[in-house]
Image: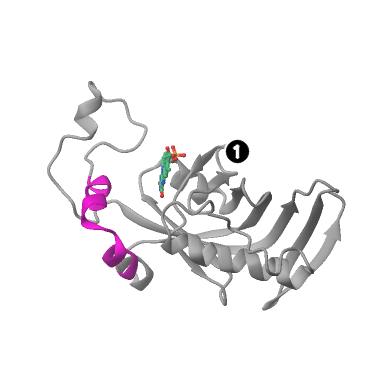
Amino acid sequence: MNATPTKDRWTGLDAILESGWRAWADAARTPGHPFRTPVVATAGDDGDARVVVLRAVDRDAAELEFHTDARSPKVEALRRSPRLTWVFHDPAGGVQWRVRGHARLHVGDEAWRSAWERVPPPSRASYACPAAPGTVVRAPMEAIDFAGHGPRHFMVVRCHAERMDWLGLRPEGNLRAIWTREGNSWKGDWVAP
Ligand SMILES: Cc1cc2nc3c(=O)[nH]c(=O)nc-3n(C[C@H](O)[C@H](O)[C@H](O)COP(=O)(O)O)c2cc1C
C-alpha cells in the first residue's frame, strides 16, 4: 500500500499537502496503511516517543486523533506541555511527514463518547486494566488477566496541527516543504532537504 498517490505526486505544494490529508484520512480507516501507526513525540518528559494508532482526522479543524490510557506517562507529559509531534513514514512512497501541534485531552465529553462507540469490543479491555501503564507488576500476566472492559481509563487525544514538514525521497534529489497554519489556511514553502 502506498500512502502517496502517483497521480498528483509532488507537482506542487497544494497537491502535496492534499495528498497528506488524503493519506491520513485513509490511514485512519485502513489497518495496514503505512500512516496508520505513526510515532508521537512529547516534550513534557524530556522528549519521549512511542507508536500509536491514528484513529481519526478532521481536516477542517486541522486535527489528528489517537486514543490512550489516561494514566499513561504520555498523558502526564502532555499535561506538563501540550506540544506533540507526529512522525509518519511511507517506505514504499519515499515520504516522511512531521506534523507538529498542540494536544487537547478529552474525557467524558462528546468527542470521548463518540470515540468510545467506535472502539471494537475486543480492544475495550485494554482501557480497564487495574494496573496503570508502566507500573511494576509481580508477573506479566497480572496486567492482562483481569475482568473488565469499560471506558474507565479511556482518553481521546486530539492534536491541532500547526506545522507540517514533508520530505519526499527521489533518486534525482530529495524535496522538502514546510507549511505553517495561518488562521484557517496553510502557508507553504519549499525548503532545502
Ligand atoms: C503498533 C502499535 C500501536 C500502538 N497503539 C497505541 C495507541 O493507539 N495508543 C497508545 O496509548 N499506545 C499505543 N501503543 C503502545 C505505545 O507505543 C506505548 O508503548 C504505550 O502507550 C506507553 O507509552 P508511554 O509510556 O509513552 O505513555 C502502540 C504500540 C504499537 C507497537
Which percent across, then down, holds residue 63? 54, 67
Magenta span main SS: helix
Number of numbered discs present?
1
Residue 151: percent from the left, percent from the top?
Answer: 24, 56
Q: Residue at x 23, y 33 (%)?
A: 143
In the image, taking residue 72 as reference, residue 49 lies left or right, namely right
Please identify the residue farthest to the top as the structure is shown: 138
Residue 187, image quadrant: bottom right
Judged from the image, the quadrant occupied by ligand 1 is top left
Residue at the location (48% across, 49% down)? 37
Q: Residue at x 79, y 69 (%)?
A: 12
Up-down: is 138 above or below 164? above
Q: Is ligand 1 closer than 8 angstroms to the Cβ of mark 1?
A: no
**Residue for badge 1:** 47
Quick one: SS at disc 1?
Answer: loop
Q: Among all residues in the image, which is located at the extreme left?
A: 147
In this view, the residue in front, 129 or 81, is 129
76 lies left or right of 122? right
Residue 116 magenta: yes
Circle 1: is it few (<14), some (14-19), or many (20+) Cα within 10 Å?
few
At 87% from the left edge and 51% from the top edge, which residue is drawn? 192
Q: Which kind of residue does numbered mark 1 sit on?
A: Gly
The type of colouring in the image is one colour
Please say whether residue 119 is one of the residues in the magenta stretch. yes
Residue 85 image position (x, y, % from top left): 61, 51
Residue 92 at what x, y percent from top left? 62, 48
In terms of depth relative to the viewer, which is nearer, 89 or 141?
Answer: 89
Question: Can you tell which quarter of the image residue 121 is in?
Answer: bottom left
Is 124 above or below relative to 129? below
| In-front residue for pair 48/90 | 90
Tell me where the magenta segment starts and ends, as one range.
114-128
Please say if 134 is above or below 51: above
